[in-house]
Amino acid sequence: MALEFKAVKVEKPADVSVIIGQSHFIKSVEDIFEAVATSSATARFGVAFCESSGDCLVRAEGNDEELKLLAASSALRLAAGHAFMVFLRGAYPVNVLNAIKSVPEVCTVFCATANPVDVVVAETGGGRRGVMGVIDGEKTRGAEGAGDVARRKEFLRKLGYKL
């Protein structure tokens, strides 16, 4: 059987983060919606899920029409079995990630990032397609020095994540 690998670039505005994962049931889109909605009062988001059997449709929900449409069109471009995508504005992924991971049908979270991201998919000759992983952000340029450590700690305190 033939196997082909492809990279699918995730297109998104700079102020939007994306969470990409894999789930396994048609109700995933509603359960992930509820997890995000109840985790952050400020989050504006769209969720899409690639159904992998039956009608094989992209299922989408959200509380922001722009992000819901972005999630749906991105998931359709991805077209990988049981993958889900959450596009998030007004909250950081860390604010909703544990809630998403606690959804019973969520199997894997591949990334949660504001960085440019490409999704590596494999497609069989039989037309099945799945996510192999993600390429998240830029290549590492070196190790942090004392000044970098100080800037990191200052940044985390500024955001309120550290005291």
Image: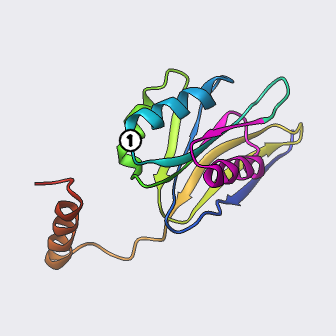
Quadrant that contains the C terminus: bottom left
What residue is at 16 percent from the left and 79 percent from the top? 147
Above or below — where is 141 with respect to 162?
below
Q: Residue furthest right?
A: 126
- Please provide the residue range marked out in magenta: 58-85
Q: Position of residue 80 (x, y in %)?
A: 73, 41
Question: In the shown orientation, is residue 91 left or right of residue 77?
Answer: left
- Residue occupying the far left of the picture: 163
Residue denoted by label 1: 40
Relative depth, front residue between 10 and 89 = 89
Q: Quadrant of residue 160?
A: bottom left
Q: Residue visible at 69% across and 24% down?
A: 26
The amino acid marked with disc number 1 is Ser
Which of the 4 image quarters holds residue 156? bottom left
**Residue at (89% x, 42% y) in the render:** 125
Indicate the quadrant containing the N terminus: top left, top right, bottom left or bottom right: top right
